[in-house]
Structure formats: C-alpha cells, structure tokens
Image: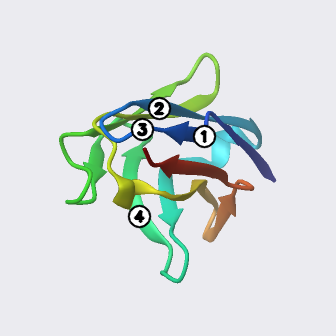
Amino acid sequence: QVQLVESGGGLVQPGGSLRLSCAVSGSIFSINAMAWYRQAPGKQRELVAHITSGGSTNYAGTVKGRFTISRDNVKNTVYLQMNTLKPEDTAVYYCNAESQVGTMTHDYWGQGTQVTVSS
C-alpha cells in the first residue's frame, strides 16, 4: 500500500506561483514513477507532469516551461512548482504513484488539492 497526501493548493492571481507537495508513505520501494494530474470542472483528468525513479521528466504541452516536477527521496516528497499561472490552470490537482510488485501494477492517488487562478 502507498499513501499520498497533497498540500499547497490555494487561490493565486494570474501570473503568480504555487508549489504543490505530495508526501509519500507506505511501500515506497514499489514505486516506479510519480506524476501530477489535474481535473477541471466538466473535463477529464489529464496528465500534467511525470517523473521516473531515475529522474526523467515529461510534461503536458500546456505547462511545459512553466511547471517543474521534482522529487526529494530523503523526504519522500514529490513537488510541482507552478509558475506564470493562468486561469486555465484552475483545477483539482492529484498526486499519482505508479507501483509495481512482481508483475502486479497499481496506481495510487491522493485526495487532491484545489488550485484556483483568478484575479
């Protein structure tokens, strides 16, 4: 089992910045990769940023150059630094862990944290 707890969401003006955190606990050894997803009202959940256990990253085109995903293996925490925020970044942001034990894979999700970009 893996537990994920997000924090750091809130209300920010356009052009502002926020940093989301995802604290990871449980069977951390089983995690291959971590990611941030978001879901806006009336829309499907979408991948925002992804980081592998080796540190390779990739981003959605809409956030590339503005958002940065990183991980602190000592603190067992994954971060999403969001800069130059736009109203269209408003969504609930979810932390995701891709776990594998043997041939069994499983996705774990946090409870989500609201990010609202508005003046």
Q: Nearer the viewer, mark 4 or mark 1?
A: 1
* Residue placed most toward the observer, 95 or 52: 95
Mark 3 or mark 2, earlier in chain: 3
Q: Nearer the viewer, mark 3 or mark 1?
A: 3
Residue drawn 76% across and 49% down? 2
Residue drawn 56% across and 40% down? 11
Look at label 4 and name its amino acid: Leu
Q: Quadrant of residue 7?
A: top right
Mark 4 or mark 1, earlier in chain: 1
Q: Nearer the viewer, mark 3 or mark 2?
A: 3
CA separation in Å, label 2 and label 4: 18 Å
According to the image, label 3 marks what residue?
13
Question: Residue 68 placed where, x, y %?
Answer: 33, 35
Residue drawn 49% across and 60% down? 37
* Residue placed most toward the observer, 37 or 104: 37
Mark 3: which secondary structure? loop
Look at label 1 and name its amino acid: Gly
- Left or right: 102 as drawn, with respect to 59: right
According to the image, label 4 marks what residue?
47
CA separation in Å, label 3 and label 1: 13 Å
